[in-house]
Amino acid sequence: MVKHFNMKEENIIKILEGKNIGPNITELVNLSKSSRSAVRTAIAKLEGANKISFRNIGLAKVYFLDQKKVKQ
């Protein structure tokens, strides 16, 4: 089944594709020029679709793109 994403989710994927070091939610908000709640919703949808994952570094969650799953 092919999952289609809206523009905010596509934007988050594009931002993560260009990053070697995963950004935290504040950096994603600044780069996407979207509200924090919109970014959090997009992240939740992408996590649910297993397209991105995160790692806790201190108090921050740093998000990464799962390259294998996005290309499917």
Image: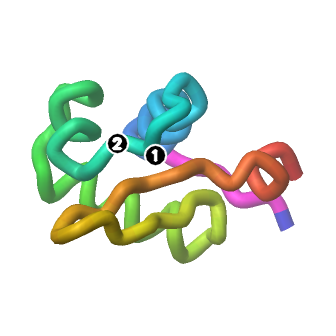
Q: Is residue 51 above or below residue 48?
A: above
Secondary structure beneath label 1: helix
Q: Is residue 25 above or below residue 50?
A: above
Q: Which residue sits furthest front? A: 58
Crowdedness of circle 1 by 10 Å Cα count: few (<14), some, many (20+)? many
Percent x, y of residue 50: 65, 70
Secondary structure beneath label 2: loop
- Mark 1 and mark 2: Cα distance apart in space: 15 Å
Dots 1, 2 in contact, CB < 8 A: no
Percent x, y of residue 8: 38, 40
Between 63 and 32, the one nearer to me in the picture? 63
Between 53 and 72, the one nearer to me in the picture? 53
Residue at image point 28% right, 29% down: 32
**Which quadrant is the N terminus positioned in?**
bottom right
Q: Check residue 5 for magenta coloring.
A: yes
Figure disc tally? 2
Percent x, y of residue 70: 74, 49
**Magenta span main SS:** loop
Percent x, y of residue 66: 69, 54
Residue 9, numbered circle: 1
Residue at image point 15% right, 44% down: 26
Q: Residue flagged by tag 1: what amino acid is it?
A: Glu
Q: Is residue 69 above or below residue 1?
A: above
Residue 23, numbered circle: 2
Crowdedness of circle 2 by 10 Å Cα count: few (<14), some, many (20+)? some
Residue at image point 39% right, 60% down: 43
Specify whether 11 is left or right of 18.
left
| N-term-proximal mark, 1 vs 2 | 1
Specify whether 4 is left or right of 19.
right
Residue interval drawn in magenta? 2-6
Between 37 and 27, the one nearer to me in the picture? 27
